[in-house]
Amino acid sequence: MSTSKKKLCIVSLKAYPLFNKNCNGIFGGAEVQLYLLAQALSKHEDLDISFIVADYGGKKIEMFNEIKIIKSFRFEDNALSKNLKFLNSLLLSNSNIFVQRTLDPASGILSLICRIRGAKFIYMVAHDNETNGLYEKNIGFLKRLLANAVFKFSDLVIVQNVTQKELLLKNKNRTSFLIKSGYFLSKFTPSKKSELDYVLWVSRSKKWKQPEIFIQLASCNPKFQFKMICPKAFDDTDEWYNHLKQKAGNVFNLEFIEFVPFDEIDIYFRNASIFVNTSLNEGFPNTYIQATKNGTPILSLNVNPDNFLDEYSCGYFCNNEFDKLNEKLNLLIGDVTLHNKMSKNAYEYAVENHNIMKSAEQLYNLFTGLK
């Protein structure tokens, strides 16, 4: 291997199921974005890319195309074992640039390790709560101190939207760079939308995603078909998840789907007439890109980053009003002309804003410019 290559290491412990289709572990949008960025960045021949994940079994080091997968610790390991195995993974990567996404006390520790070793550290904000102060309210002093260290010691901080950028400067006095989340895009055919008739919801079962509201929406609209893809979140209780399944099972026009592999999820977005988001808050949901790149209009209860649903006319923001959510659902299903217009707008928005190759190039240009 050429010594002139830049050594880049991406850290995302729950991302392994994205690389191994036989592993059914649960992951979120942050893992998806780093997985896609790794693939896009691997096109650069001057990069040697490694990717640290948790140990899901099998070989400790695997190759995925040009990406070296390094397994660190098992989630059930004790704290000492986790720390030692993770440090060993960092050494195995032998990298001089590290990238991590989603705020955690470990983010601050990793940024400190990089500073001590003389490596560069790039942190990518995953959620609005990381910049608006809400994340800090739910953790103790030491964890808060460690988590906030990431904004002090990172060489670059990347945000997903303008709101995060402004809040980070206001609340943390930290400058940042805006790189929008992205996906690999395929050609969309608007005519395929005319015969579709189900309403889609996709997310983990976390309570702040408010899955029960979608169940209520389905119950209020027995004439329409609904599909709910809702894998159990990593830290959710069986009691909560079984409650959701039972509640969904009582709605005859709602299909509850526990898990869909990542490489099969696109067909659900492509065949949906409308995508619904009921979360209390988010950063920029991956599902918004999955919906728009497949020409599926969005109905959002609370989440409208940078007001894009209104600006690009690719859906409706309902301002936390269930009645408005229900009203706009019926409007979009009942007005074919309006639906087709929003479908076309959604796809054009995705092409303009969320091409992963463009996002990867922005990131590449930033970290190659670090001194």
Image (cartoon, rainbow, N blue to C red):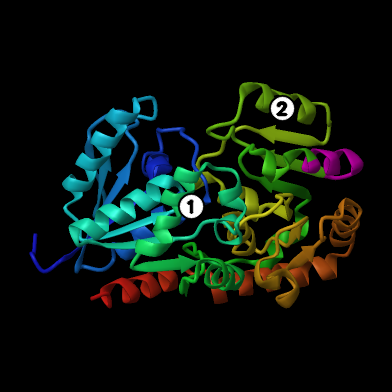
Say above or below: 186 vs 21.
below
Say above or below: 226 vs 348.
above
Disc 1 crowd rating (10 Å Cα; few below 14, some 14-19, many 20+) is many
Q: Where is residue 2 shown, x and y percent of the image?
A: 8, 64
In what quadrant of the picture does the C terminus appear?
A: bottom left
State the residue in front, 160 or 39. Answer: 160
Q: Residue at x 76, y 65 (%)?
A: 315
Query: What residue span does the magenta drawing correspond to?
Result: 213-224
Say whether residue 222 is visible: no
Q: Residue at x 32, y 51 (%)?
A: 110
- Disc 2 or 1, which lies upstream in sequence? 1
Q: Is residue 153 magenta?
A: no
Q: Where is residue 259 shown, x and y percent of the image?
A: 57, 35
In the image, taking residue 236 as reference, residue 223 lies left or right, namely: right
Q: Secondary structure at mark 2?
A: helix
Q: Secondary structure at mark 1?
A: helix
Say whether residue 328 is visible: yes
Say above or below: 178 vs 268.
below
Q: Where is residue 181 shown, x and y percent of the image?
A: 51, 64
Magenta highlight: main SS: helix
On residue 30, which mark appears? 1
Tell me how far mark 2 sits from mark 1, CA to CA: 25 Å
Say above or below: 141 vs 165.
above
Q: Is residue 217 magenta?
A: yes
In the image, taking residue 308 as reference, residue 147 lies left or right, namely: left
Q: Nearer the viewer, mark 2 or mark 1?
A: 1
Q: Where is residue 243 shown, x and y percent of the image?
A: 73, 25
> Going by the picture, which residue comes out furthest to the front?
141
Q: How many marks?
A: 2
On residue 245, which mark appears? 2
